[in-house]
Image (cartoon, grey):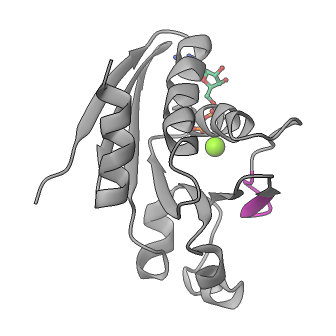
């Protein structure tokens, strides 16, 4: 079974903001829903930038700080709970077990995960994988659905 995919090109943080807002709006129209979103790409690719606008579009009014040192930042919003992870500094994936990672993947939670490869088998599988490639200020964002729920989001994106 293959699911929908979409590729965006962004030549500025503002363009990435628009793409992020578009994706978040598609997610918002489907709430309540549990979604696991992996964000892949090198340091500085724009994973946190993307997450910041995504979380704000879902209803968070304040600052979104990078969870690099805390591993996870929670946002308990009116319509949905969003958990933003950055696993870059995770030394041992087993630490995720100790922090009760499973509880974050609730039916009605949206989880955004930077550096998912560091979490290995302790993470829930992705509904959406966003891979960001960067060249100077140009970013290519490849958004791939990996489940029926993810597919619904990507299809909502691609429709005019
Ligand atoms: P990551 O979380 O992937 O390590 P960040 O989002 O923290 O990356 O940083 C991305 C940096 O790249 C920011 O300083 C941002 O302003 C800059 N940038 C330049 N061009 C873009 C673009 N087209 N989209 C997103 N970020 C961009
Ligand atoms: Mg980051």
Quarter occupied by residue 5: top left
Quadrant (top left, top right, bottom left, bottom right) of the N terminus: bottom left
Residue 71's image quarter?
Answer: bottom right
Above or below, 5 relative to 112: above
Q: Please name the residue shown 46% across and 54% down the image.
A: 38
Seen at 57% across and 32% down, the residue is 44
Total numbered labels: 0
Q: Position of residue 124 (x, y in %)?
A: 45, 74
In percent of width and height, residue 100 lies at 68, 86
Residue 58 on image: x %, y %: 69, 41
Front in this rendered view, residue 155 or 97: 155
* Residue 129 vertical position relative to residue 45 in the rendered view, above or below: below
- Judged from this view, the residue extending furthest toward the right is 62
Q: Viewer-proximal residue, 82 or 38?
A: 82
Q: Spot the residue most to the top.
A: 11
Question: Which residues make up the magenta segment?
Answer: 67-74
- Residue 97 seen from this side: yes
Q: Residue farthest to the left?
A: 1
Front residue (pair 56, 65) = 56
Q: Is residue 144 left or right of residue 49?
A: left
From the image, which quarter does the C terminus lie in?
Answer: top left
82 in relation to 158, above or below: below
In magenta segment, residue 72: yes
**In the displayed structure, does residue 104 sit left or right of residue 62?**
left
71 falls in the magenta region = yes
Judged left or right of residue 125, residue 24 is right
User: Could you tell me residue 12's position as x and y percent?
Assistant: 55, 10
- Quadrant of ligand 2: it is top right
Say which of 42 and 153 sits in front: 153
Q: Residue at x 53, y 64 (%)?
A: 34
Predominant SS along the magenta part: loop
């Amino acid at each position: 079974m293959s699911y929908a995919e979409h590729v965006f090109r962004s030549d500025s943080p503002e363009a990435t903001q628009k793409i992020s807002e578009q994706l978040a709006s598609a997610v918002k129209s489907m709430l309540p829903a549990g979604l696991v979103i992996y964000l892949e790409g090198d340091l500085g690719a724009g994973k946190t930038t993307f997450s910041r606008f995504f979380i704000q579009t879902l209803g968070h009014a304040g600052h979104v700080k990078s969870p690099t040192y805390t591993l996870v930042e929670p946002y308990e919003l009116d319509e949905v709970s969003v958990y933003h992870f950055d696993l870059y500094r995770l030394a041992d994936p087993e630490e995720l077990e100790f922090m009760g990672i499973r509880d974050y993947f609730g039916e009605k939670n949206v989880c955004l995960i930077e550096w998912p490869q560091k979490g290995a088998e302790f993470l829930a599988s992705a509904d959406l994988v966003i891979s960001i490639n960067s060249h100077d200020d140009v970013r290519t964002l490849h958004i791939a659905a990996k489940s029926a729920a993810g597919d619904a989001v990507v299809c909502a994106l691609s429709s005019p």
